[in-house]
Image: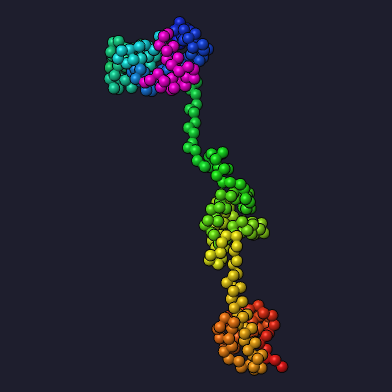
């Protein structure tokens, strides 16, 4: 877009001196200014944008307002009562794409005093502007990457604080799954009857002992929650976290069975007969010896194993 004569023009050196910059920097500023005009102000009326917007698009990092002021003072921008600021001789510097765009809309450059639009194709027989200048190749910088929205996964500082300390790791089929304190607290709330920390230790031992059944990274979460849910269902309702007793119901039944068996035996011993009917337990309940069944190493009452050793229902000899 830049004319070959631009770097030798006095205004070019004046811009360098005004901004205290090197030749390549000044040439880049002018090219960027013309690119800005071609994209957002094809008629050259860049004054419809604020000075800060122009400098921002050009990525000027010097004093605010100094760039537009220097471009205006040395003559690369012209002041206009109607448009505030216009590109000086924009009809000479505009590229072919901009000329065609204005030709299709039958719009004139604001810097072209003849009021006609250049027709570079020549099909209409009207050429109001000079021929397209031979552009000097200028490297086009790569676009700056757009930063991704911040999330818990991408915020390196916030994530560790939110997850808390590392509690343990669970072996996977490839690598390990880290368990943090925040997850433990969530599980405690979801499964109040389960000793979460002990179950994690049990879970890790099971995974270490069963390497062929270890889970994948995507499946470990489902595995953990299924484990806790099963432990919750096996726990006695109302038992708080950390005091789990999965065999409480079985133990209670055994104790009741033992009490009934002892009451029956005491009644039998007092009568000296095996036909004791309706022996009373300590709880005030009557049992029938027909409901009492013995076996090697245990006493069964109504299907409950008492845990009392020996075949105590064998009649005395």
The residue drawn where x is 59% and y is 49% is: 180
Determine if the magenta segment contains residue 19: no
The residue drawn where x is 63% and y is 58% is: 198
How are the residues colored?
A: rainbow
Q: Is residue 218 above or below residue 41?
A: below
Numbered marks: total? 0
Q: Which residue lies furthest to the right in this view?
A: 317
Q: Which residue lies furthest to the top in this view?
A: 10
| Magenta residues (range) | 49-74
Which image quadrant for residue 161?
A: top right
Q: In this view, does 48 lie above or below 224?
A: above
State whether residue 120 appears in this view.
no
Quadrant (top left/top right/bottom left/bottom right) for the N terminus: top left
The residue drawn where x is 65% and y is 91% is: 270
State whether residue 115 appears in this view.
yes
Which image quadrant for residue 257?
A: bottom right
From the top left corner, tell me how far across and down residue 287 is, in percent.
57, 86
Q: Nearer the viewer, residue 132 or 48?
A: 48
From the top left corner, tell me how far across and down residue 155 is, in percent.
53, 39
Main SS of the magenta segment?
helix
Q: Which of 199 and 59 is in front in this view?
A: 199
Quadrant (top left/top right/bottom left/bottom right) for the C terminus: bottom right
From the top left corner, tell me how far across and down residue 108 is, in percent.
30, 16
Determine if the magenta segment contains residue 56: yes
From the top left corner, tell me how far across and down residue 166 is, in percent.
62, 48
The residue drawn where x is 29% and y is 22% is: 105
């Amino acid at each position: 877009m830049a004319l070959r004569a631009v770097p030798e023009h006095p205004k070019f050196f004046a811009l360098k001196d005004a901004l205290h910059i090197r030749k390549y920097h000044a040439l880049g500023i002018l090219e960027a200014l013309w690119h800005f005009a071609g994209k957002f102000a094809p008629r050259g009326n860049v004054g419809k944008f604020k000075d800060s917007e122009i400098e921002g698009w050009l990525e000027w990092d010097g004093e605010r307002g100094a760039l537009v002021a220097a471009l205006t003072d040395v003559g690369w921008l012209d002041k206009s009562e109607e448009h505030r600021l216009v590109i000086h001789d924009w009809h000479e510097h505009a590229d072919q794409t901009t000329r065609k765009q204005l030709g299709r809309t039958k719009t004139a450059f604001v810097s072209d005093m003849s009021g006609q639009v250049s027709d570079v194709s020549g099909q209409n027989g009207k050429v109001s502007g000079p021929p397209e200048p031979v552009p000097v190749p200028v490297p086009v910088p790569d676009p700056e990457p757009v930063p991704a929205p911040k999330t818990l996964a991408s915020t390196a500082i916030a994530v560790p604080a939110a997850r808390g300390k590392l509690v343990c790791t669970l072996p996977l089929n490839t690598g390990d799954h880290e368990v943090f304190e925040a997850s433990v607290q969530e599980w405690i709330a979801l499964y109040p009857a389960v000793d979460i920390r002990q179950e994690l230790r049990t879970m890790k031992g099971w995974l270490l002992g069963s390497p062929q059944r270890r889970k994948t990274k995507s499946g470990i979460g489902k595995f953990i929650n299924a484990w806790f849910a099963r432990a919750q269902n096996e726990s006695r309702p109302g038992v708080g976290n950390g005091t789990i007793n999965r065999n409480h119901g079985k133990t209670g039944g055994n104790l009741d069975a033992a009490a009934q068996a002892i009451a029956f035996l005491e009644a039998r011993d007092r009568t000296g007969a095996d036909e004791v009917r309706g022996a009373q337990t300590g709880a005030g309940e009557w049992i029938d010896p027909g409901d009492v069944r013995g076996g090697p190493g245990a006493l069964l009452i109504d299907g409950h194993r008492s845990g009392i050793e020996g075949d105590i229902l064998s009649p005395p000899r």
